[in-house]
Image (tube, helix red, strand yellow):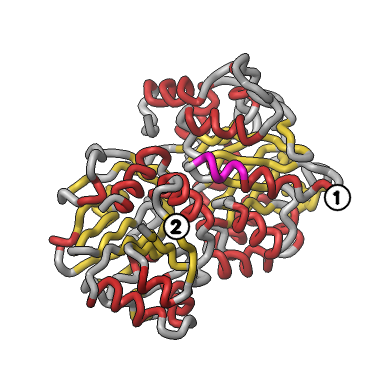
């Protein structure tokens, strides 16, 4: 099996690579590339993302044909794709970080700044927070409710259809921290930095 | 609920841990990779490496340490010490650091913070503030505490927030190494001034100091070095103690 981590200059992806390689050992081949034909032929795709919504969308659009290839992979061919952090946020129609920016539009909704309630909550939301599992997502197999995951973000994904939400976390309000829509998965937290429990989520995705 | 973080810090010089955990089962007490692994297995919420390598020719040793550690530890890794430019930050991130802390370079030229937070995102830019009390003010020190800049620490904290820092690592130079506790006044002044998380550092001698840093200093995270060294306290003990004092921690 081939799992491709999309390398599109979206910031620091070395931790994502290290964690997937750790979980995959030698049983699964982990590719790190922006090569369109390799993405097309892989079994699963991981879409990481760090920095701002706009910088990630711009970086993605800078690679000719990448958005179309991902669209074909996840929407037309319905193959499993996992978005992490801004990778998840880009599933939305639109994001408001820096400036209004169009997303991939795979899951209707928007990405807006977390309400810090006039400074009551520090932003970014950095650190370990519990997840409240609201849907039996395939990537949460053998993951206990209220497990701790590592977060670092200031913006949140607000999907229109609440049925796609598979977990939320409590920070100022119930923030969407995981979604599942058919073959499309996303986590706002960083499984690659969430210790053994995070690696288990990666293992679940690899073994889908 | 967001948990308060406990961050053990390891001083690394020429690729070796200077003061480390003195565990009998440790094969190589000076190996930063092994030490970091012990901390992450013990429940550390984050690991911090402070590179205190003095000579330029040995500076590359930290990259190798970071690369090896990031393949074994799957909690966030922050690296600081001698970070001068956007290029240095880029190299550390590529080796597997999740955050980079900038100290002297941020004071000398805040553009480094502006530029690097734009390029890599605020989430990986930590500004380290070393401050010393002078009358009723705190002043910023650079070059490992040797150089007094005269800059007001509280104002500087605000400036770093607006420059794009994602977190502030605040060290009291008066307390560092003394084991008498954090400078609570400094921590709480900075924490109430900025809307980004503050990591308290400098002076921890016992577990109550960690409690004070969070309860009185309003720090989001507490960093300590020596109490975790020589096995005086484990990270697990520290977390259980904080939990018993009603502080939310990841256990």
Callout 1: SS: helix
Residue A8 at x, y = what percent?
49, 72
Picture coordinates of residue B54, whole percent (x, y): 84, 43
Q: Give the Cα distance between marks 1 and 2.
A: 35 Å
Taking the magenta stretch, the answer to whether it contains residue B72 is: yes
> On the image, which quarter does residue A80 sit in?
bottom left
Closer mark to the observer between disc 1 and disc 2: 2
Q: Nearer the viewer, residue B99 or B211?
A: B99
Circles 1 and 2: CB atoms closer than 8 Å: no
In the picture of the structure, the residue carrying the numbered disc 2 is A30
Q: Residue furthest bottom?
A: A64
Going by the image, does B241 lie left or right of A95?
A: right
Q: Is residue B243 above or below residue A116?
A: above
Looking at this view, is A162 or B170 the one in front?
A162
Residue A123 visible, this angle: no
Q: Is residue A17 left or right of residue B55?
A: left
Residue carrying label 1: B57
Q: Residue at x 52, y 70 (%)?
A: A9
> Which stretch is magenta?
B68-73
Quadrant containing the N terminus of chain B in the rendered view: top left
For the point 39% across and 38% down, the residue is A196
Mark 2 is surrounded, within 10 Å at the Cα level, by few (under 14), some (14 to 19) or many (20 or more) other residues, namely many
**Looking at the rendering, which quadrant does residue A46 occupy?**
bottom left
Horizontal arrangement in the rendering, residue B201 relative to residue A55 (left or right): right
Q: Are marks 1 and 2 on the same chain?
A: no
């Amino acid at each position: 099996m081939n799992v491709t981590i999309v390398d599109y200059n979206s910031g620091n992806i070395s931790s994502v690579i290290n964690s997937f390689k750790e979980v995959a050992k030698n049983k699964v081949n982990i590719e790190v590339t922006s090569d369109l034909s390799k993405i097309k032929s892989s079994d699963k795709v991981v879409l990481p993302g760090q920095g701002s919504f706009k910088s990630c969308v711009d970086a993605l659009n800078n690679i000719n044909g990448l958005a179309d290839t991902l669209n074909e992979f996840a929407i037309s061919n319905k193959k499993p794709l996992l978005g992490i952090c801004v990778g998840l946020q880009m599933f939305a129609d639109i994001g408001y970080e820096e400036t209004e920016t169009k997303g991939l539009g795979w899951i209707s909704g928007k990405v807006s700044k977390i309400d810090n309630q006039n400074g009551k909550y520090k932003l970014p939301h950095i650190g370990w927070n519990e997840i409240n599992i609201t849907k039996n997502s395939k990537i949460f197999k053998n993951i206990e409710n209220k497990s701790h995951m590592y977060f670092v973000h200031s913006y949140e994904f607000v999907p229109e259809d609440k049925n796609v939400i598979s977990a939320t976390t409590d920070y100022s309000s119930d923030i969407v921290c995981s979604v599942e829509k058919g073959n499309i998965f996303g986590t706002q937290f960083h499984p690659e930095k969430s210790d053994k429990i995070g690696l288990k989520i990666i293992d679940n995705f690899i073994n889908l | 609920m967001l948990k308060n973080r406990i961050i053990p810090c390891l001083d690394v010089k020429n690729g070796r841990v200077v003061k480390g955990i003195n565990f009998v089962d440790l094969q190589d007490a000076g190996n930063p990779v092994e030490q970091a692994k012990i901390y992450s297995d013990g429940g550390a919420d984050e690991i911090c490496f402070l590179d205190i390598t003095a000579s330029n020719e040995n500076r590359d040793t930290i990259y190798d340490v970071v690369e090896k550690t990031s393949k074994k530890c799957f909690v966030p890794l922050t690296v600081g010490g001698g970070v001068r430019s956007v290029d240095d930050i880029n190299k550390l991130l590529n080796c597997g650091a999740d955050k980079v802390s900038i100290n002297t370079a941020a004071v000398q030229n805040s553009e480094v913070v502006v530029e690097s937070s734009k390029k890599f995102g605020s989430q990986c830019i930590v500004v380290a503030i070393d401050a010393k009390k002078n009358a009723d003010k705190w002043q910023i020190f650079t070059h490992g505490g040797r150089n007094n800049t005269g800059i007001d620490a509280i104002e500087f904290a605000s400036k770093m927030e607006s420059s794009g820092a994602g977190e502030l690592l605040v060290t009291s130079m008066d307390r560092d190494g003394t084991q008498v506790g954090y400078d609570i006044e400094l921590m709480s002044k900075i924490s109430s001034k900025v809307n980004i998380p503050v990591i308290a550092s400098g002076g921890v001698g016992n577990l109550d100091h960690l409690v004070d840093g969070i309860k009185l200093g309003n720090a989001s995270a507490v960093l300590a070095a020596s109490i975790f060294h020589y096995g005086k306290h484990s990270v697990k003990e520290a977390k259980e103690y904080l939990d018993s004092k009603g502080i939310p921690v990841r256990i």
